[in-house]
């Protein structure tokens, strides 16, 4: 058995024994470097993989190896020199200088591509929740414009969309230095279009965009109800698409749920690959905390990490916020913190593990999600854009807070309780086989809990 075969066999068995999130996080890019007598050296991509394999998985790895080769007694883990990219390397590869601030490096955004070099694949944790979009984007990065075009990635707030699509941009810039790449948040695109219409320079804006090889548009949901901008985007999109230029799009919801958006644009989005980012499980959350604390030079004991990961569930940005906060305290007072100290430091972030959801919050969140005003949800209107959010708000009041039907009716301007029963029944029924609606409601629930 060659060492490659041996490792393959180990991986195959481990995969059965641990969650796929963990498998992806800890065992990706590992291999047997040396096999000599009783000793095995395993190469791992970074320090945190090393630590986890040593502390958590060493026993099982050794057990499996010994089942195949009795002689093996000892494993050491070595961080691969080629696979690791240090912060300095990430910055210098695009010509950025470290400004000397070691703990909170300020990365400089590239003026041409708009990309921020802090977003890299090397510091992006992959788990079951983002495996699919990560795989799709990795394929695109190797072969821009050739597969999955457009690539549409969606998911809730703070779950890594911007990180992932910018990492793709940075990686393409590295592998294909000649390609013109542009990252653009849709709000910026909108203001660009508005300004150039005002300055009569719209044709130069368009021809500028049409020269791009890889267009990355972030938070495309903001184009909803911006008709003029949508039209310009549609033309740019088509030109690039026809020339096999890669288009990567992110959104906080699937194309179907972006309303109102021109049908032709929606069907363009749906014509490529759509992948969603779900919610990270606890072990992936801990893995993310580990990466973030290493980046910040923060000492984060396992117990503390578990405490944070248990209480912050729906938003990676908040996990990061917790680490930043601890970093500040550790810098001021360089002693080891116990979980009690951490609890008090984080009390503003982790107020109540299960934040109570209020009637007001449900209504606000639904209105915001469907991009209508809060008072419109109460208005007497039969417009589809209003009726649907209203029915969903009613449904959620019942479903989450168990409000009585007459109470919900009163909340909605004295509507008869039969109306609320009807709304609840209709949405419940639709949920049985309408995947899009399911997804929308899940996204709304995610927001309610974050
Ligand atoms: P979104 O665009 O979905 O709102 P971001 O990409 O801005 O979310 O992510 C929020 C923060 O969390 C960023 O600082 C990002 O670096 C970090 N982050 C999100 N997902 C991951 C991940 N899987 N691994 C490492 N960091 C992540
Ligand atoms: Mg974002």
Image: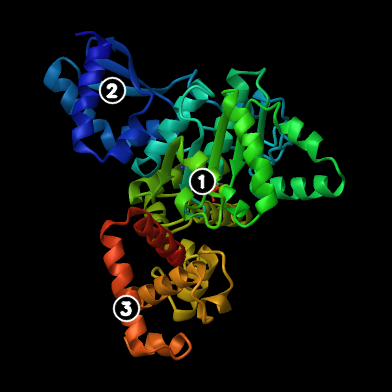
Report the residue that reaches farthest toward the right: 199
N-terminal label among 3 and 1: 1
Discs 2/3, front: 3
Q: Quadrant of residue 213?
A: top right
Q: Quadrant of the N terminus?
A: top left
372 shown above or below 252: below
Residue labelled with disc 1: 266
Secondary structure of the residue carrying numbered label 3: helix
N-terminal label among 2 and 1: 2
372 shown above or below 114: below
| Crowding at mark 1 (Cα within 10 Å: few <14, some 14-19, many 20+) | some
Residue labelled with disc 2: 75
| Crowding at mark 2 (Cα within 10 Å: few <14, some 14-19, many 20+) | some
Mark 1 and ligand 2: say if the CB distance to the nearest ligand atom is below 8 Å: no
Q: Would residue 26 appear left or right of 118 to someone viewing this image?
A: left
Q: Would residue 191 appear left or right of 87 to someone viewing this image?
A: right
Is residue 254 shown to the viewer in this render? no
| Crowding at mark 3 (Cα within 10 Å: few <14, some 14-19, many 20+) | some
What x and y, as percent, mark residue 121? 51, 32
Q: Residue at x 33, y 29 (%)?
A: 27
Q: Would residue 174 appear left or right of 299 to someone viewing this image?
A: right
Q: CA distance from mark 2 to mark 1?
A: 53 Å
- Of 13 and 235, nearer the camera is 235
Q: Residue at x 80, y 40 (%)?
A: 202
Secondary structure of the residue carrying numbered label 2: strand
Marker disc for residue 422: 3
Q: CA distance from mark 2 to mark 3?
A: 64 Å
N-terminal label among 2 and 3: 2
Q: CA distance from mark 3 to mark 1?
A: 30 Å
User: Is there a contact, CB below 8 Å, between mark 3 and mark 1?
Assistant: no
Secondary structure of the residue carrying numbered label 1: helix
């Amino acid at each position: 058995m060659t060492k490659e075969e041996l490792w393959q066999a180990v991986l195959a068995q481990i995969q059965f024994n641990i969650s796929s999130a963990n498998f992806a996080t800890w065992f990706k890019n590992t291999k047997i470097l040396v096999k000599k007598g009783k000793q095995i050296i395993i190469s791992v991509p970074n320090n945190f993989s090393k630590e986890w394999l040593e502390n958590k998985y060493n026993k099982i790895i050794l057990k499996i190896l010994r089942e195949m080769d009795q002689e093996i007694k000892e494993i050491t883990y070595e961080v691969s020199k080629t696979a690791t990219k240090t912060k300095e390397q990430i910055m210098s590869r695009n010509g950025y200088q470290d400004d000397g601030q070691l703990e909170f490096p300020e990365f400089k955004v590239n003026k041409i591509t708009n990309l921020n070099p802090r977003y890299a694949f090397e510091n992006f944790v992959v788990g079951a929740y983002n495996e699919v979009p990560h795989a799709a984007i990795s394929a695109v990065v190797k072969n821009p414009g050739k597969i999955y075009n457009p690539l549409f990635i969606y998911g809730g707030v703070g779950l890594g969309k911007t990180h992932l699509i910018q990492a793709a941009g940075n990686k393409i810039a590295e592998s294909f230095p000649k390609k013109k790449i542009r990252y653009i948040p849709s709000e910026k695109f909108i203001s660009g279009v508005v300004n150039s219409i005002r300055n009569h320079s719209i044709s130069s804006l368009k021809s500028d965009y049409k020269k791009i090889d890889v267009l990355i548009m972030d938070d495309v949901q903001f184009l909803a109800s911006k008709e003029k901008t949508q039209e310009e985007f549609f033309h740019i999109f088509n030109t690039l698409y026809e020339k096999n230029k890669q288009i990567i799009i992110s959104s906080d919801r699937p194309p179907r749920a972006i309303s109102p958006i021109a049908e032709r644009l929606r069907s363009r989005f749906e014509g490529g690959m759509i992948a969603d980012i779900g919610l990270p499980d606890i072990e992936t959350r801990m893995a993310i905390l580990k990466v973030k604390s290493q980046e910040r030079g923060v000492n984060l004991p396992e117990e503390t990490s578990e405490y944070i990961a248990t209480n912050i569930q729906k938003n990676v940005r908040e996990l990061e916020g917790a680490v930043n906060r601890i970093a500040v305290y550790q810098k001021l007072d360089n002693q080891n913190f116990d979980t009690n100290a951490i609890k008090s430091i984080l009390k503003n972030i982790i107020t109540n593990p299960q934040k109570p959801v209020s009637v007001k919050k449900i209504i606000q969140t639904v209105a915001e999600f469907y991009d209508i005003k809060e008072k419109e949800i109460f208005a007497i209107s039969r417009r589809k854009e209003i009726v649907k959010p209203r029915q969903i708000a009613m449904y959620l009041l019942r479903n989450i807070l168990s409000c009585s039907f007459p109470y919900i009716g009163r909340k909605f301007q004295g509507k008869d309780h039969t109306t609320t029963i009807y709304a609840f029944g209709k949405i419940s029924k639709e949920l049985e086989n309408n995947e899009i609606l399911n997804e929308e409601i899940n996204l709304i629930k995610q927001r309610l809990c974050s």
